[in-house]
Amino acid sequence: MGILTSRTSRLEAELQARLQLREPRRDAYAEFIRASRAVQNALYVAHDQHLDGADARVMATAINDHEEAVIAAYSRVALEGPDSVVLAADAVIAAESVIWRSARAHSDAGLDPNEEPLGLHAVGDLASRIRDFITAARKAVDISS
């Protein structure tokens, strides 16, 4: 009986450790998803307001308006880990950065948004990276494995 009791105690301790990691991770991941979705939604709104292509300044502003929340949420994700989730968050940040840099370059060059519109493909890529993050986050908070 001693071996079985020892094994059961160890399994219970492992489960408790996973549960203790789960809550802060889940909260950090949810915060990052909310902040990233806010950027995505703002970009869609910016695009919808300019049906021929979003004005570059509007696109850059949409990201700037949510930057602080995204960075704060990313910081929590980076601290909570694991690496697979942090890498997925990095991809979200990179997708936002591509849109921001393109919008700034577009605006700085003084391009007419009707001639050189910033397409929805970049926002679609951001949406895809957010979905990848959600998948990684779900795996990280799954305590069944």
Image (tube, helix red, strand yellow):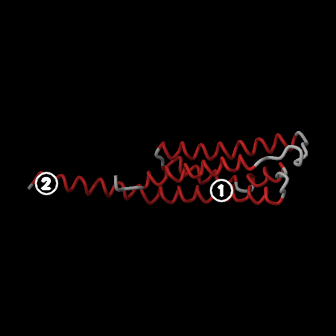
Residue 118 on image: x %, y %: 80, 46
Local crowd at mark 1 within 10 Å, few (<14), some, or many (≥20)? some
Q: How many marks?
A: 2
Q: Amino acid at mark 2?
A: Leu
- Mark-to-mark CA distance, 2 and 1: 48 Å
Question: In percent of the image, x 83 and y 48: which residue is there?
Answer: 56
Quadrant position of the N terminus in the picture = bottom left
Q: Is residue 16 above or below residue 78?
A: below
Question: What label does residue 69 carry, if any?
Answer: 1
Q: Give whichever of 118, 75 is nearer the camera.
A: 118
The earlier-in-sequence mark between 2 and 1 is 2
Residue 43 on image: x %, y %: 74, 55
The residue carrying mark 2 is 4
Q: Is residue 12 left or right of residue 81?
A: left
Residue 40 on image: x %, y %: 68, 55
Q: Quadrant of residue 116?
A: top right
